[in-house]
Amino acid sequence: MVIGEETIEFLAGSIRTARVLNALERAAGALQGINNSVLGICRLAVILIVGGLAVLLSCAVFWRYALNNAIPWSEEAAKYLMVWLTFVGAPVALRDGAHVSIDVLPAALSGRARQVALFLINVVIILVCVMLIWQGGLFAKLGARQVASSFQLSMFWVYLAVPLGGFLLLLVSLGHALRALIGIGDPDRGLVESHDSYAEEVRE
């Protein structure tokens, strides 16, 4: 379905009023503050998990080949840490625009049309996140009946990464959707997708 200029103008007219824009701006600002705090914790968690993986795998290799005495639980523990790394790191990557994406359509648009496209993209992401939270919660509930094969850990704590990651992704995509909605009314205050900060971080 193609959204015509008349539809975009109607949406813009509905949002452009000062009261609506200010309300959306306050909501977006509050959500951004929450996301900054939560994603700061996620970033720290990613660093700790990567560090833990490096130590664990180094020890596993040393024990196996130098001492000829493999650590029986190292492979399974590393696998579960990677699951958590994925779902804790994904929201940080989404906020920084670091996920692989096909941005031909948004890049070809400008102004309100671009903001509409970004808004619809984030609506789709929100729907996927809701599904992740719902199905991931059911999955974690089933995991409470299982225990890891090489050490005594309930699989609930492993599967919990799915609904938690879905919730964190939901917070980020809601913030993006709100900012794009503001941009439909006023493109100068809308969502700006820039990879510059991420590229700078990678270089560092």
Image: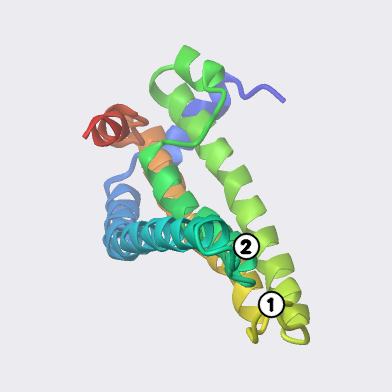
User: In this orientation, which residue lies closer to the viewer: 16 or 132?
Assistant: 132
> In the image, residue 55 lies at what x, y percent?
40, 61
For label 1, the SS is loop
Report the residue at 30% width, 29% height from top. 199
Of labels 2 and 1, earlier in sequence is 2
Q: Is residue 15 visible?
A: no
Q: Quadrant of the N terminus?
A: top right
Question: What's the residue at 69%, 76% (across, down)?
Answer: 140
Which residue is depicted at the point 41% across and 17% down? Answer: 110
Left or right: 76, with 139 as reference point: left
- Residue 158's spot in the image, x, y percent? 62, 72
For badge 2, the amino acid type reads Glu
Give yes or no for contact between labels 2 and 1 (Cβ–Cβ under 8 Å): yes
Q: Which mark is residue 31?
A: none
Query: Where on the picture, by quarter, is residue 79?
Result: bottom right
* Residue at the extreme front: 67
Q: Secondary structure at mark 2?
A: helix
Left or right of 158, for residue 5: left
**Going by the image, does 57 lie left or right of 75?**
left
Name the residue beneath numbered marker 1.
Answer: 150
For the residue pair 188 and 91, the one nearer the viewer reads as 91
Which residue, as the protein is rendered here, is positioned at the far top?
Answer: 108
Circle on res. 75:
2
| Label 1, residues with CA under 10 Å away: few <14, some 14-19, many ≥20 | few
Q: Amino acid at mark 1?
A: Ser
Image coords of residue 144 (percent x, y): 72, 85
As measured in the structure, the alpha-carbon distance from the residue carrying label 2 to the one carrying label 1 is 9 Å
Q: Quadrant of the C terminus?
A: top left
Instruction: Decide: is 200 above or below 26.
Output: above
